[in-house]
Image (cartoon, rainbow, N blue to C red):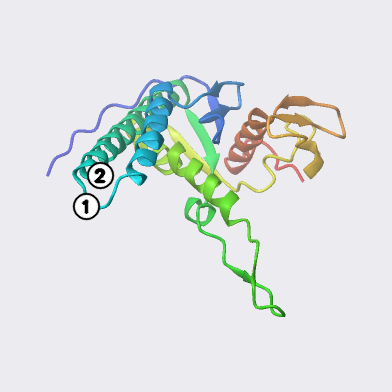
């Protein structure tokens, strides 16, 4: 069966590395910080409120059935808004850049529940960070990283753009200016300050610049930093 393929987009001469996050949906190597969609956040807040209300209703009651219906309706609305946001963001990136580089994040591993830890002497279970991990996992699901990446992939292919995935190791700890690698460079969630050269940057933007550098290295355009 014949399938229509749109013609490739004209070249822009621009390249970008992107860092996916929770506070910012995307940080780019040229300094853009893209916040999650406002409508999506508002719907997510309404969903949380509707779920709390549902938990107060007696099972089998008409009130619970109506509350469950509201939760389902908001769930569908949130999913549609996240999908639309991912479509718009991926389209804007594909239109603007010839090369897009992102990390090869193992999302399934990142959202997996930690294994229980049992004290061999007492037989009791030790804290394993499950509560904190649950919050992070929920944020990753809410951010829709997997959906966004798949949209970028097929749009890039249709447009004749190049999409490269790179190893995420050390991208948040390496200085994008001098290459110095040290965990303490990432002095906070939002700030990067190189202890070797003093370079300062928004932490996610610094990571995005490292991601772009790694992608360009894979294409043989620049040497890989040690």
Q: Picture coordinates of residue 181 (x, y %)? A: 79, 42
Q: Picture coordinates of residue 10 (x, y %)? A: 39, 20
Q: How many discs appear?
A: 2
* Dot 2 alpha-carbon crowd within 10 angstroms: few under 14, some 14 to 19, many 20 or more: some
Q: Is residue 108 left or right of residue 196?
A: left
Q: Which mark is residue 99?
A: none
Toward the bottom, the furthest residue is 121
Indicate whether 135 appears above or below 159. below
Name the residue nearer the viewer: 87 or 112.
112
Indicate whether 212 appears above or below 30. below
Dot 1: what SS? loop
Q: Is residue 97 left or right of residue 124?
A: left
* Dot 1 alpha-carbon crowd within 10 angstroms: few under 14, some 14 to 19, many 20 or more: few
Q: Residue at coordinates 29% horizontally, 34% vertically from top-left?
A: 74
Is residue 73 at least partly visible in the picture? yes
Is residue 160 at least partly visible in the picture? no
Name the residue nearer the viewer: 61 or 33.
61
Q: Which mark is residue 64?
A: 2
Toward the left, the furthest residue is 1
Name the residue nearer the viewer: 95 or 124.
124
For the N terminus, the quadrant is top left
Indicate whether 220 appears above or below 94. below
Q: Picture coordinates of residue 54 (x, y %)? A: 32, 42
Dot 2: what SS? helix
The answer to the question of whether label 2 and label 1 lie on touching residues, with beta carbons closer than 8 A, is yes
Which picture quadrant has residue 186? top right
**Marks 2 and 1, Cα distance to the nearest angstrom?**
7 Å
Q: Picture coordinates of residue 124 (x, y %)? A: 64, 73
Q: Residue at coordinates 79% horizontally, 37% vertically from top-left?
A: 185
Q: Which mark is residue 60?
A: 1
Q: Residue at coordinates 68% horizontally, 39% vertically from top-left?
A: 172
């Amino acid at each position: 069966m014949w399938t229509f393929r749109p013609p490739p987009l004209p070249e822009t001469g621009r390249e970008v590395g992107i860092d996916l996050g929770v506070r910012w949906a995307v940080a780019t190597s040229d300094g853009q910080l893209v916040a999650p969609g406002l409508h999506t956040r508002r719907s997510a807040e309404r969903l949380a409120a509707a779920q709390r209300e549902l938990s107060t209703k007696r099972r089998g009651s008409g009130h619970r059935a109506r509350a469950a219906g509201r939760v389902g309706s908001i769930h569908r609305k949130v999913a549609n808004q996240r999908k639309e946001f991912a479509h718009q963001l991926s389209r804007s990136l594909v239109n603007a850049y010839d090369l897009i580089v992102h990390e090869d994040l193992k999302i399934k591993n990142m959202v997996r529940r930690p294994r229980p830890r049992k004290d061999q002497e007492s037989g009791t279970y030790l804290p394993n960070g499950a509560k904190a991990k649950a919050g992070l996992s929920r944020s990753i699901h809410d951010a829709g990283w997997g959906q966004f990446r798949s949209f970028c992939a097929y749009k890039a292919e249709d447009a004749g753009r190049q999409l490269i995935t790179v190893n995420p190791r050390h991208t948040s700890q390496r200085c994008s200016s001098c290459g110095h690698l040290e965990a303490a460079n990432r002095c906070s969630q939002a700030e990067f300050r190189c202890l070797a050269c003093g370079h300062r940057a928004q932490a996610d933007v610094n990571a995005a610049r490292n991601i772009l550098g790694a992608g360009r290295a894979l294409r043989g355009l620049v040497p890989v930093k040690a």
